[in-house]
Amino acid sequence: MTDEGHIAALDGDCQIRSDDGWMRRALEEAELAGSRDEVPVGAVVVRDGTVVGSAGNTMEGRQDPTAHAEMQAIRQASSATGSQRLAGSDLYVTLEPCAMCAGALVLARIERVVFGAYDPKAGACGSLRNVAQDHRLNHWCTVVGGVLEEECSEVLRGFFARLRRGKRDAQP
């Protein structure tokens, strides 16, 4: 192996550790959302190693179908940076973005989308469709899926199991 190959391998290793760390931050947002009886999805926007936006789902509390974690984090990041264009930023989210959120990622010019759990029913970053990498659009994002997948999936499974259990307990 050449020195250059060794450096590339080390850089990739550092990126994996970094992705895990930011995903853990998104998991914290997801758990906060779950504690508010929201579907536990969390998102973090990172630029130059700094969080510029972070949020969990707030759809129930706001009664707003667009209040997904990704949308909220993008709004915060745009406000923090003073720009709707978030070029050079990465978004970490615990669940694969839906079509609406993937479209917003493209419009915001997010560089990389890193998600935890795959969403075979609504995922628009590779599972059901791939809006984020549709080369017919004027921007596309690098997509990395499955980061801390089991942990992200478990937060969702636990939430929906409690929800089903609560509904069963409430029935006469």
Image: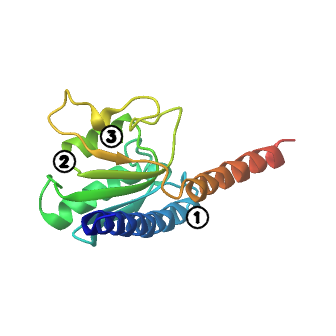
* Tag 1: amino acid: Ser
Tag 1 residue = 35
| Label ID, residue 102 | 3
Tell which of 148 and 35 is nearer to you: 148
Q: Provide the secondary structure element on which disc 3 rests.
A: helix
Tag 2 residue = 109
- Labels 3 and 1: the sequence-earlier one: 1
Instruction: Report the residue that reaches farthest toward the right.
Output: 172
* Tag 2: amino acid: Arg
Q: Provide the secondary structure element on which disc 2 rests.
A: loop
Q: Residue at x 74, y 45 (%)?
A: 164
Label 2 Cα crowd, 10 Å radius (few <14 / some 14-19 / many 20+) = many
Labels in figure, total:
3
Look at discs 3 and 1 and give the one toward the viewer.
3
Label 1 Cα crowd, 10 Å radius (few <14 / some 14-19 / many 20+) = few
Q: Residue at x 19, y 62 (%)?
A: 79
Where residue 12 sits: x, y (%)? Answer: 35, 63
Tell which of 159 and 18 is nearer to you: 18
Residue 78 vs residue 42: left or right? left
- Distance from label 2 to label 1 (Cα)? 31 Å
